[in-house]
Amino acid sequence: MPKVSYVVDLSDKERVKLLNIVNKGKATAKRILHANILLAADINNPNKASSPVIAERFHVHRQTVQTVRKTYATQSLEAALDRKKRTKPPIDPKLTGDVEARIIAICCSNPPPGFERWTLRLVAEEAVKLEIVPTISHTSVGRILKKTNFNLI
C-alpha cells in the first residue's frame, strides 16, 4: 500500500462532530460527503480505507479524496468541510462608492435650465455627460438613490 502523504487523524471531538453532520443530514450534500470522506480516511477508524477505495465507495474522483485530506491536514476541519470563500467577486462592481457619491451630488445640485427638478433619466444623462461613468441606466440611478434613502421630490 502506498504511503499516504496527508494523514487524517481525527480527535474524538472532531469525529463526533462529523458523525452528527452525517447522521442528521441537515447539512449540504457536499459537506456531508466531505464528512464521510474524512471519517473513512481517519487512521483511528477500524474500517479505514485507501483513497481509491474511498473514492469508489462515495462515487467521487481520487483527487477529491486527496484534496479533502490535504485541506484537513494543512488547514482545518472547517476548511475541509466547506467551500473556499472567494476573496473577490468575479466581476468588479461598476458602481463604486465614489460613483454613488457623485450621482447623489448631482441630485443635490440645481436641475438643468427648463426643468423644475431632477428626474432619474436626467441624472443618468448628466452622469454620462460629466464622464462619471461611461453608461448608466435610469434604473441604476434609482437603485442608488433608494439604497441611500434619497428622495428626488
Image (cartoon, rainbow, N blue to C red):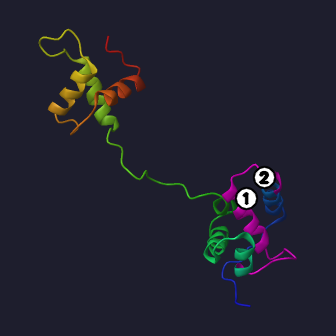
Q: Is residue 22 above or below residue 128?
A: below
Quick check: is 50 in the magenta stretch? yes
Q: Secondary structure at mark 2?
A: loop
State which quarter of the image contains the N terminus: bottom right
Q: What's the amino acid at mark 1?
A: Ile
Coordinates of residue 142 in the picture (x, y in percent)? 34, 24
Marking on residue 25: 2
| On screen, residue 104 above or below 4 | above
Foreground residue among 132 and 47:
47
- As for residue 49 lying within the magenta part, the answer is yes
Residue identifier under label 1: 32
| Label 2 close to label 1 by CB (< 8 Å) | yes
- How far across and how far down the image is residue 41, in percent? 76, 74
Q: Image quadrant of residue 48?
A: bottom right
| Furthest residue in direction right, as rendered | 46
Residue depicted at 11% across the width and 13% down the height: 113
Residue 12 at x, y percent in the picture: 84, 64
Crowdedness of circle 1 by 10 Å Cα count: few (<14), some, many (20+)? many
Q: Quadrant of the C terminus?
A: top left
Earlier residue among tags 2 and 1: 2
- Tell me where the magenta segment starts and ends, as one range: 23-51
* Amino acid type indicated by mark 2: Gly
- Residue 50 found in image quarter: bottom right
Name the residue located 34 percent from the left edge and 35 percent from the top edge: 97
